[in-house]
Image: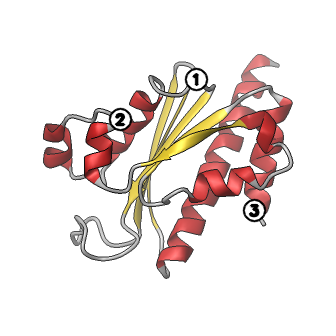
Amino acid sequence: MPSTLVLESCKALAANNLTITFAESATAGSLCAAFAMAPQSGQVLKGGIVCYDAVLKEHILHIPPGIIKKYTPESAEVTEQLSRRLKKLIKADVYVAVTGLTTSGGSETPEKPVGTMFMHMIWEEKSLGLREVYRGKPEDIIAQAVDRVARMVLDLIRDVKKVEN
């Protein structure tokens, strides 16, 4: 069952006739799965790409290897590029990318510990990137990231509606 935040996010997307698509690394399809379980999924979810390995980021989403090497596959810079390049593959209104570290063995450092997640969302000319650090087992970290993305979507829609009114 999707979380309350995911359900609210899907309702808000549907109420505003918006669609969403994902490029997922660390969440490994969890965003698509959560949004697919909402009653409005057929109206709002376009789908997504799971690009867990850096090779897929390079070959499917065409992230230059130099960017991945310079910043690491789990970085704000790569996450932003994923969301921007997703626009070239899937037509939607909202584009979201997520990378991060749910287990050790990646690019973790004292400044970027396990639990660090990067999220980037693009809607029209708006672009928002976040870096969050979560605690828990990998499934806990992923669940927190999914909810944070749902909150990002809700906040953006609410902010835009305030501006329009």
Alpha carbon separation for disc pair 3 and 1: 24 Å
Tell me the kind of residue under disc 2. Answer: Leu
Q: What residue is shown with label 3?
A: 2
Q: Tell which of 90 and 164 is nearer to you.
A: 90
Quadrant hosting residue 74: bottom left
Which disc, if any, is residue 118? none
Between the residue at mark 2 and the residue at mark 3, the CA separation in whole angstroms equals 27 Å
Residue pictured at 20% horizontal, 34% vertical: 64
In the picture of the structure, the residue carrying the numbered disc 2 is: 61
- Quarter of the image with the N terminus is bottom right
Left or right relative to 162: residue 109: left
Q: Which residue is mark 1?
A: 91
Q: Residue at x 77, y 18 (%)?
A: 164
Closer to the eye: label 3 or 1: 1
Q: Position of residue 151 (x, y in %)?
A: 66, 50
Q: Residue at x 78, y 44 (%)?
A: 41
- The mark that comes first in sequence, 3 or 1, is 3
The vertical placement of 20 against 116, above or below, is above
Q: In the structure shown, which secondary structural element does the residue marked by tag 1 occupy?
A: loop
Percent from the top left, x then y, of residue 22? 54, 42
Q: Locate residue 114 relative to residue 138 in the image: left or right.
A: left
Pointer 1 or 2: first along the chain = 2
